Amino acid sequence: MHGLTEGVARFRHDVFPAKAKLFADLEHHHRPPALFIGCSDARVVPELITQSEPGELFVIRTAGNLVPAHTPAPDGVVASIEYAVAVLGVTDIVVCGHSACGAMTALAERHDLSAAPAVAGWLRHADASLARSAGGVDSLVRENVRAQLANLATHPSVARALAERTLTLRGWVYDIPTGAVEQLDTADGPPALAA
Ligand code: ZN
């Protein structure tokens, strides 16, 4: 628990008081405008990168920012996407990959994952990404974001919102050492924000 308890104490004493009204309002109000799907990697912090306040970003983080295609079987990622789109009504979804991604590196460099069978199985959701990649980690990171955006569109709630033009999908790649965010051209349209 290195530093976590101290961090909570600092939050309570130094951070919370300045935002007390915001937190009080949020108790009965949960209407985030955006869903951010990023990697579980500790170096990629969605709220920090986007400078979002509590209540502004619905977040799903998975190894490799992978988004399983829709399945009717119980699945935490599938359920979270449906909740964000169909219930909370988010109008933007970002799938964000990043430099030096461990998951993408393992795939691009064909690491032996026999000691981590759950990881190996999960990374099969990047099969299409691998097939589209020109080779190398950087190429795979980008093709993976595009492939996961395609997977996202297989979810009925997402497909419905796209058809009704109430939802925009975006693909980003975050560069850890520089903090730059690259916006990828996607089938859904050109980049909307400056990197
Ligand atoms: Zn990663």
Image: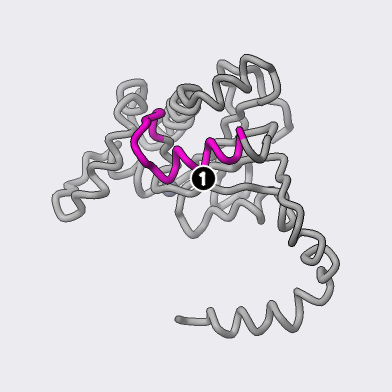
Q: In this view of the protein, can residue 181 be seen by the observer?
A: yes
The C terminus, quarter of image: top right
Foreground residue among 176 and 192: 192
The x and y percentages for residue 92 are 67, 33
Indicate whether residue 83 is drawn in magenta.
Answer: yes
SS of the residue under disc 1: strand
Identify the residue shown where x is 45% and y is 81%. 1
Q: Which residue is mark 1?
A: 38
Q: Is residue 131 left or right of residue 84?
A: left
Amino acid carrying mark 1 in the image: Gly
In this view, 129 is above or below 177 = above
Bounds of the magenta segment: 68-86
Q: Examine the image and state in which quarter residue 124 appears.
A: top left
* Res. 182 visible in picture: no
Q: Is residue 91 magenta-colored?
A: no
Residue depicted at 44% across the width and 42% down the height: 77
Label 1: how many residues lie within 10 Å, few (<14), some (14-19) or many (20+)? Answer: many
Q: x%, y% of residue 169?
A: 61, 27
Left or right of residue 52: residue 137: left
